Structure formats: C-alpha cells, structure tokens
Amino acid sequence: EIIERFGRFPHRNDILGRDTTDEEHTFLKEPMSSF
C-alpha cells in the first residue's frame, strides 16, 4: 500500500539521502504510519 501510494518507502528517505515530499511528511506524522 505504501509503495502503491508513494512508489517507495518514505521511512527510508533520510537513510538513503532522498528528499521527502510534503505528502510523505504528512503521512509520516500520522499515527500508525511506522512499522
């Protein structure tokens, strides 16, 4: 579901040096967004 929505795992952006989109930031702040 996360891959379908974003095309990647937003949780890994910092580790992989990727920019996080506004939509990903919003998602990551939601309850239950982490594994």
Image (spheres, helix red, strand yellow):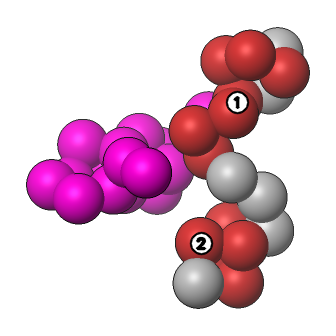
Residue 11 among those drawn in magenta: no
In x, y percent, where is residue 22? 47, 45
Inspect the image, locate mark 1, and give the three-letter code of the amino acid beneath it: Asn
Q: Secondary structure at mark 2?
A: helix
Instruction: Find residue 18 and report its image quarter.
Output: top right
User: In this orientation, which residue lies closer to the viewer: 33 or 5?
Assistant: 33
What is the three-letter code of the residue carrying label 2?
Ile
Q: Is residue 32 left or right of residue 17?
A: left
Q: Position of residue 5 (x, y in %)?
A: 62, 78
Look at mark 1 in the image and give the residue it sits on.
Answer: 13
Residue under the image location 70 percent in, 84 percent down:
4
Question: Which of the numbered marks, if any, corresponds to residue 26?
Answer: none
- The stretch in magenta equals 19-35
Which residue is depicted at the point 79% across and 68% down?
7
Q: Quadrant of residue 1?
A: bottom right
As drawn, 17 above or below 9: above
In the image, residue 1 sits, relative to residue 30, either above or below, namely below
Instruction: Indicate which disc residue 2 carries.
Output: 2
Is residue 30 covered in magenta? yes
| Residue at the image point whose x is 84% and y is 21% from the top | 16
Question: Could you tell which of marks 2 and 1 lies nearer the N-terminus?
Answer: 2
Residue neighbourhood size for the residue with mark 1, other residues' Cα within 10 Å, grouped as few (<14), some (14–19), many (≥20) = some
Viewer-side residue, 23 vs 11: 11
Residue 21 appearing in the image: no
Q: Secondary structure at mark 1?
A: helix
Q: Position of residue 19 (x, y in %)?
A: 72, 27
